[in-house]
Image (tube, coloured by chain):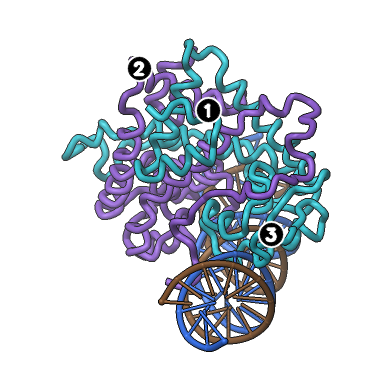
Chain colours: A purple, B cyan, C blue, D brown
Amino acid sequence: MTDVNFKPSISPAIQDGDHPMKDTALPSGESELPYDLIELLFFAYREFTGDPDDVLAQYDFGRAHHRVLHFVDRNPGIMVTDLLGILRITKQSLGRVLKQLVDAGIIEQREGHHDRRQRLLYTTERGHTLAVDLTRLQQKRLERALIGLPDGGEEIIRKFLLQMMDPDARADIVKLVRSAHDLED
Amino acid sequence: MTDVNFKPSISPAIQDGDHPMKDTALPSGESELPYDLIELLFFAYREFTGDPDDVLAQYDFGRAHHRVLHFVDRNPGIMVTDLLGILRITKQSLGRVLKQLVDAGIIEQREGHHDRRQRLLYTTERGHTLAVDLTRLQQKRLERALIGLPDGGEEIIRKFLLQMMDPDARADIVKLVRSAHDLED
DNA sequence: AGAATTAAGTCAATATGACTGACGTAAATT
DNA sequence: AATTTACGTCAGTCATATTGACTTAATTCT
């Protein structure tokens, strides 16, 4: 361990009261800005994506590999083009990560039957196992987060997250996510 | 525009039914894994962080700058050490980003009164304005996401996000986020 | 008063994941 | 036959992060 502060005091210095402009005006309703939700989203998402990291590190993989693995495992036989569309990265970016996953025996490519230009993507048995392991880590955190919510809480979370998407993107997302289709109000 | 697929069809090739192992077994209750929440979180967070990008690009800033700006604006007079703790990055990483923000007149550093080693961080007037502008972008998306949720929906979201954190980290987060303190169950 | 610790910063090298731009090849579509 | 699509590759770059070593100044501890 070198320089990094893992568990800091997190106590901003409120010692001297001469902040330049805070407390002085709040010109246009700034006090109503949803700072709490914004920050909670930041911290929650960081924790959420952090869980799989240790496991992935054992394979010399990173988050990019996780994302590819996840969506291939969830959409067996997906085309490279469609995967690029989901991840919104370039094929050059995908290329390196995908090659490493194929070389490691996590993902395999098969020629399309109807269209022989396609290299359809599948997880191998090992790859599927890894994908499920990582999902279970995230499942644990989600289950803890859902504890104590009122009835229908999970549905509310789902609706909230879906509505975070631009309206015209929602249909596509719902199609992709599948199990969320029951809240297409 | 070159190679990138911005609005793809997102329709995994379900054409050929010979997936290697899917639909064949589901050995250990995999069907109950919360794939929908996991994917919705991924897409929702991407949209959420994507909003400020265009504005930031005009200043030649990226997400790293946004995070620093946000937490400095929210915690005027914060110590460098505490900021490092919140962001969980090294001071070398912070160094470059912070220098650019200071050079651009977005953040200013002042010597601590009680401890002259400290370089307490404040947003300038310009910096504060930028921070608020970015927050308002995210506010818009959040408000759209909260539409149509039942009464107490926002509280449920807040509780969910807070419970995504490890229990021992929650107190610190609550202290930092402040406005969330009413749900410390 | 002297030693140890803390706050902040710097130099140097490296890794990861992304990007742009330009091309190439095979297969399908028009 | 011409065009488009699917996929891949070569080459260079950028943003953000890392590790490790070291310095300076100021505070705290003994």
Tell me, yes or no, if residue B41 can be seen here. yes
Looking at the picture, tell me which residue is in the foreground, B124 or D28: D28
The picture places residue B10, in percent across and down from the top left corner, at 52, 35
Category of crowding for the residue at label 1, using alpha-carbon neighbours closer than 10 angstroms: few (below 14), some (14–19), many (at least 20): some
- Chain that bears disc 2: A
Mark 2: which secondary structure?
loop
- Chain that bears disc 3: B
Mark 3: which secondary structure?
loop
Identity of the residue drawn at 38% across and 20% down: A153
Identity of the residue drawn at 32% across and 61% down: A105
Q: What residue is disc 3 on?
A: B112
The picture places residue B167, in percent across and down from the top left corner, at 35, 41
Q: What residue is disc 2 on?
A: A150
The answer to whether the residue labelled 3 contacts the one labelled 2, judged by CB atoms less than 8 Å apart, is no
Looking at the picture, tell me which residue is in the foreground, A6 or A119: A6
Looking at the picture, tell me which residue is in the foreground, B4 or B180: B180
Number of marks? 3
Q: What residue is disc 1 on?
A: A172
Category of crowding for the residue at label 2, using alpha-carbon neighbours closer than 10 angstroms: few (below 14), some (14–19), many (at least 20): few
Identity of the residue drawn at 43% across and 34% down: B162
Looking at the picture, tell me which residue is in the foreground, B85 or B76: B76
The amino acid marked with disc number 2 is Pro
Tell me, yes or no, if residue B69 can be seen here. no
**Are both tags, 1 and 3, on one chain?**
no
User: Distance from label 1 to label 2 (Cα)?
Assistant: 29 Å
Eyeballing the image, is D18 above or below C12? above
- Chain that bears disc 1: A
